[in-house]
Amino acid sequence: MAGQEHVVRALTNALSQNRLHHAYLFTGTRGVGKTTIARIFAKSLNCQTGITATPCGVCSACREIDSGRFVDLIELDAASNTQVDSMRELLESALYLPTNARFKVYIIDEVHMLSKSAFNAMLKTLEEPPPHVKFILATTDPQKIPVTVLSRCLQFNLKQLPPGLIATHLKYVLEQEKIEFEPGALNLVARAAQGSMRDALSLMDQAIAFSSGRVEEAAMRSMLGAIDQGYLFALLQALQQKDGAALLGIADDMAGRSIAFESAMQDLASVLHRIALAQTVPQAIADDESGREQLMELAAVFSPEEIQLFYQIAIHGSAEIDLAPDEYAGFTMTLLRMLAFMPSSAASLSPPIAGQPDKISAEKTNKAPVRQDEAIPDWAALTGRLKIQAMAQQLAKHCVLESFSDDQMVLRLSEEHKHLQTRTATDNLQSALKDHFGKPIRLAVVLGKVTAATPARIEHQHRQDRQNQAIDAIAQDDFVRDAQTMLGASLSPESIKPVQ
């Protein structure tokens, strides 16, 4: 049960102290071990050595449970048995004592698929359970289970497994099986499994057959259809050099090799995430990680702000790629957006001629910090002057100004208000900025932690200050004081409103 120590510890303590409940609910995404831990728990309850957290595995009960022949362990797939008749038949059999066991154990998988009538039938047994019966329910969607059923179960949430833990477990399995492997191949499988150990083991079985007994990174990339990270590193190097022509050239080469741009976009976001980790927590990048040297080099040449901005653009590009005319257009437009919004960038689609300094770009760059220092606007004051309303106004009020230069503005929005970042709101805000400054403004909104006061927070504080002043003014009024003294009157602060 790799990665589920919190559940194992809780069940171990319950078994050791013989503090057993009649119904258990295991929740979690696919392949994290819900059914596996249910079967192990059934062995712990019925092992012939006694109720134990360490079933012997050799007694007849343990062996029959392992082989699926234990009469008193009944497994039901609720996805294919949703009707109330199946549940009633099962519950009627629960009234009878076990044939040859300590407890009759019912494992109901995907329990959220049961009908309302089936849940009602189950509820009566859960309310007055026979002492010889234990229910173990498993589901990927606990929100669909009635509260009346949830309240009668001990619930354990099995975690989605991180790639590092999956890779470590795969390494252990391959070493036990004496199969040669490359660490980079294990990392690819661990990421492709998306938190599911079962999927990871299935992919590894497939990989062993695919690679004729040796698990190699190149073969794994071919099997999974994973993009060669060399393309991604080259893209980021071209971006760092502000070389738009090189960016498009690499994208054209990817198209010529029939690489799926939707997957490439997700992989690009993953690489940017690894670079951000390398910048803040270098030890998080393992020494044997594929491409570690390139990751560390890119972490050194880009600023953390640039990486955060690129990551945000990549995530948006991935979400919007289906709306693009085609995948190539969506992918290249995302790259060009990164190029356009590089902080203090004077990038163009054509790099400077070799041997000649880009005097015009340098002059523009030198003038743009000057402008940022001299004319950076007060964002709270500016939002009050912009001709915006509805969602665009709310978006502006919950942002802080990240950076501003000549024709480019970057705003930061907290995660809790990301629902305000709609395409319509962003476009309307950008249009209002264009009208205000009398020229086109390139606007980018990035998500992140907001510590400075937003216009909305400033407005709220101003309203609160005025309210407090109004309450203080009423409390200090001579007439009000006399009324309190002579009539025993009291103030109702919620009824006091400041004069507009």
Image (cartoon, rainbow, N blue to C red):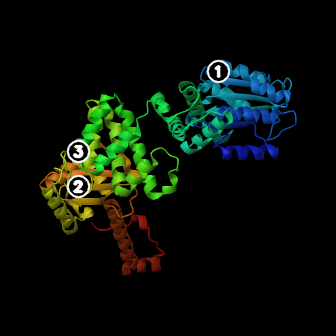
Say above or below: 357 vs 162: below
Tell me the element at label 2. loop
- For disc 1, the marked residue is 84
Marks 3 and 2, how far apart at CA: 12 Å
Task: Give the foreground label among 3 and 1.
Answer: 3
**First in residue order: circle 2 vs circle 1:** 1
Say above or below: 397 vs 268: below
Badge 1: how crowded within 10 Å, few (<14), some, or many (20+)? some
Question: Closest to the observer: 494 or 88?
Answer: 88
Tell me the element at label 1. helix
Q: Amino acid at mark 2?
A: Ser
Task: Give the foreground label among 2 and 1.
Answer: 2
Side of 463 relative to 79 (left or right): left
Q: Which mark is residue 472?
A: none
Question: Closest to the observer: 91 or 498?
Answer: 91
Q: Which mark is residue 244?
A: 3
Marks 2 and 1, how far apart at CA: 65 Å
- For disc 2, the marked residue is 345
**Picture coordinates of residue 303, whole percent (x, y):** 35, 58
Marks 3 and 1, how far apart at CA: 63 Å
**First in residue order: circle 3 vs circle 2:** 3
